[in-house]
């Protein structure tokens, strides 16, 4: 299993497994994970009146993705749209911005998580529809780097395990749950890594060029 990007949080060398990737579980101690394992899905969204009916219709259209590193807003949609050639790829800072672009006609198809779409779809007056929903992927886990002192590792595990129920519920965390299987997400990331630089082209070929 490869080692993928993880963000640093709380203490130096405490690696937090987020939507941006994963880390080698053999080397890291499991702290806790989200209770919504396999609950994340990416959706490709268009305006309700859009003529776009299939994924191949993205050819020659403006595609709006989330920020690089996002599983549901970036890696998964790139995987789903592999082989197509949008006229342009734009990167939105938030799902709300992507929906605004769709509403104003500045983008033709937008990517975000299914949860985000349901949360923000009413933030603009324009009606939307889901063109495509991806396979579900696990949500994040907290993994502790082996570089962290053993006593600190044990302390962190104890603190996370004894978190107040209200805090654990807000974080959607199950302290003693096993880490999810990220094989599908790793497959997505490894497939699209070679084409990431292509999104800066106009048009943007979402495939490996000969």
Image (spheres, rainbow, N blue to C red):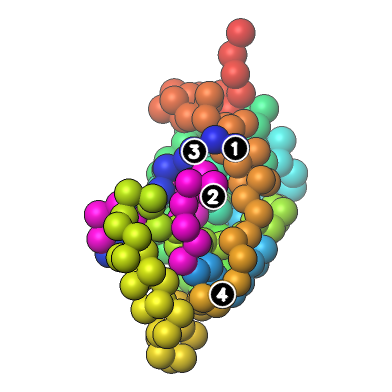
Q: Residue furthest left?
A: 12
Where is mark 2, residue-wise? 25
Task: Kindly identify the residue that appears in the image at 74 percent across and 47 percent down.
Answer: 53
Q: What residue is disc 1 on?
A: 1
Residue found 50% across the figure and 61% down from its top: 30
Relative to 198, 38 lies left or right: right
Q: Main secondary structure of the magenta part?
A: loop
Residues tagged 1 and 2 counted as in contact (Cβ below 8 A): yes
The nearer-to-camera label among 3 and 2 is: 2
Q: How crowded is mark 1: few (under 14 residues within 10 Å), some or many (20 or more)?
A: few
Where in the figure is residue 90, as x and y percent of width and height? 42, 41
Give percent across and percent down for residue 153.
36, 64
The CA distance from mark 1 to mark 2 is 9 Å
Q: Residue 64: give x, y in percent of width and height.
A: 48, 45
Tell me which label, 1 or 2, sits earlier in the chain: 1
**Residue placed furthest toward the front:** 151
Q: What whole-number distance in Å separates the C-alpha atoms at marks 4 and 2?
A: 15 Å
Q: Mark 3 points at which residue?
A: 3
Q: How far apart are marks 3 and 4 (CA)?
A: 23 Å
Marks 2 and 4: in contact by CB < 8 Å? Answer: no
Q: Nearer the viewer, residue 178 or 181?
A: 178
CB under 8 Å between discs 3 and 1: yes
Q: Quadrant of residue 183?
A: top right
Q: In terms of depth relative to the viewer, which is nearer, 78 or 1?
A: 1
Range of magenta residues: 11-31
- In the rendering, which numbered label is found on residue 28? none
């Amino acid at each position: 299993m490869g080692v993928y990007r993880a963000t640093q949080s709380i203490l130096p060398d405490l690696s937090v497994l987020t939507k941006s990737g994963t880390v080698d579980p053999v080397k890291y101690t499991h702290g806790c994970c989200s209770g919504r394992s396999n609950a994340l899905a990416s959706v490709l969204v268009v305006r309700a009146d859009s003529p776009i009916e299939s994924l191949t219709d993205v050819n020659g259209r403006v595609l709006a993705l989330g920020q690089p590193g996002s599983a549901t807003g970036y890696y998964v949609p790139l995987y789903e749209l592999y082989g197509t050639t949008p006229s342009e790829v734009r990167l939105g800072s938030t799902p709300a911005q992507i929906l605004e672009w769709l509403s104003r006609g500045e983008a033709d198809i937008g990517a975000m998580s299914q949860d985000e779409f349901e949360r923000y779809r009413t933030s603009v007056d324009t009606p939307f529809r889901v063109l495509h929903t991806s396979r579900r992927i696990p949500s994040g886990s907290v993994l502790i780097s082996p570089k962290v002192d053993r006593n600190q590792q044990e302390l962190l595990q104890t603190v996370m395990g004894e978190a107040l129920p209200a805090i654990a519920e807000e974080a959607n965390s199950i302290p003693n749950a096993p880490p999810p299987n990220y094989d599908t997400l790793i497959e997505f990331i490894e497939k699209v890594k070679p084409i990431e630089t292509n999104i800066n082209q106009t048009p943007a070929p979402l495939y490996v060029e000969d």
